[in-house]
């Protein structure tokens, strides 16, 4: 089998649940979780090998061929995206735009990517910027530069966020944006904006819940500042080379964006 899938779980819509016959179906749109699957192209060394996964984007169905005589297994999700899907197409169709709009309306929104090593999680989330050597700011151009067709969900979400903020501020709203970027590596939490701070402690309190002590919080006065946080974080993530991936992320990374809104008159 050469195809691998990256699944992004997104609150605020439907989700996939198993059925009695071993297939899966999508629950109603009122569910709290939306599940979308992206199948990556086969690696260079596997070109010409029979594909194990068939994608039907129209019906949101992914069919797995076991290759051992067993009947194929069909699974349905909120959306399924095939090997030819571009970064822009995935961003526009995966449901993230609705997530951003909901966040601006005051709801919590999360995108969680998971899949096996080499399945394309980092590329989907961060694009080619994640392939720069550690400690070197990557990306298709300088911070604040023009969009690249290789940009991932994070860069595209940042641009849409500020585009929507601009529209809403024209209607009398005022937004404050803050951002943090951390990684969990070898069971330790590290600040990706200020990596020299070393391992940070995770604390809990009745007023704040769980939080990371001394984590840098960047006040973002515009898109340029948020792009800087993303670029810095990607540059400082731990990565390693292995057989499946030349630039494999070796940590769990969490980018958090906090929004406060008020009427301009306040």
Image (cartoon, rainbow, N blue to C red):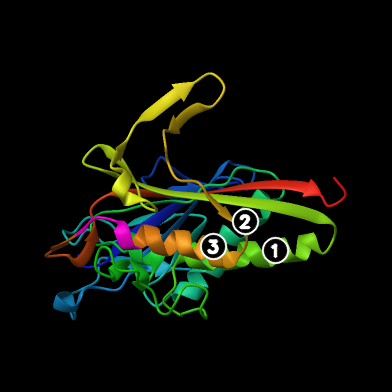
Residue 225: which numbered mark, if any? 3
Locate residue 214, reporting x and y percent.
Answer: 42, 37
> From the viewer's perspective, is residue 30 above or below residue 250?
above
Q: Identify the image quadrant of the C terminus.
A: top right
Q: Identify the image quadrant of the N terminus.
A: bottom left
Is any part of residue 61 visible from this angle?
no
- Secondary structure under the numbered disc 2 in the rendered image: helix
Q: Residues within 10 Å of mark 1 (few under 14, many from 20)?
A: some
**3 and 2 marks in contact (CB < 8 Å):** no
Q: Which residue is mark 1?
A: 164
**1 and 2 marks in contact (CB < 8 Å):** yes
Identify which residue is drawn at 61% across, 61% down.
97
State the extent of the magenta-drawn residues as a range: 235-239
Q: Which residue is mark 2?
A: 100
Identify which residue is drawn at 60% across, 42% down.
108
Is any part of residue 89 visible from this angle?
yes
* Residue furthest out toward the left: 243
- Secondary structure under the numbered disc 1 in the rendered image: helix
- Secondary structure under the numbered disc 3 in the rendered image: helix
Q: From mark 3 to mark 1, how far is it between C-alphas?
A: 16 Å
Q: Residue 160 versus residue 189: which sits nearer the camera?
A: 189
Q: From mark 1 to mark 2, how far is it between C-alphas?
A: 9 Å
Locate residue 83, reporting x and y percent.
Answer: 36, 73
| Mark earlier in primary sequence (3, 2) | 2
Locate residue 76, reporting x and y percent.
Answer: 45, 55
Place residue 100 in its image quadrant.
Answer: bottom right
């Amino acid at each position: 089998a050469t195809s691998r899938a990256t699944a992004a779980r997104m609150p605020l819509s439907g989700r996939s649940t198993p059925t009695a016959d071993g297939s899966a179906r999508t629950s109603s749109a009122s569910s709290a979780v939306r599940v979308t699957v992206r199948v990556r192209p086969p690696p260079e060394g596997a070109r010409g090998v029979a594909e194990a996964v068939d994608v039907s984007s129209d019906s949101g169905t992914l069919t797995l061929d076991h290759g051992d005589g067993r009947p194929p297994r069909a699974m349905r999700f909120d959306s399924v995206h095939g090997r030819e899907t571009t970064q822009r197409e995935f961003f526009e169709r995966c449901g993230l735009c609705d997530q951003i709009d909901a966040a601006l309306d005051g709801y919590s929104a999360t995108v969680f990517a998971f899949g096996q090593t080499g399945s394309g999680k980092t590329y989907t989330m961060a694009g080619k910027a994640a392939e720069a050597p550690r400690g070197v700011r990557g990306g298709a151009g300088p911070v604040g530069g023009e969009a690249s067709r290789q940009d991932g969900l994070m860069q595209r979400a940042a641009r849409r966020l500020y585009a929507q903020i601009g529209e809403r501020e024209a209607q009398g709203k005022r937004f404050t944006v803050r951002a943090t970027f951390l990684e969990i590596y070898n069971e330790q939490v590290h600040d990706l904006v200020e990596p020299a701070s070393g391992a940070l402690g995770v604390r809990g309190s009745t007023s704040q819940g769980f939080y990371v002590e001394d984590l840098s919080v960047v006040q973002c006065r515009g898109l340029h500042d948020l792009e800087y946080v993303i670029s810095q974080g990607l540059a400082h993530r731990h990565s390693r080379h292995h057989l499946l991936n030349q630039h494999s992320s070796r940590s769990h990374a969490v980018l958090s964006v906090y929004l406060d809104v008020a009427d301009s008159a306040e």
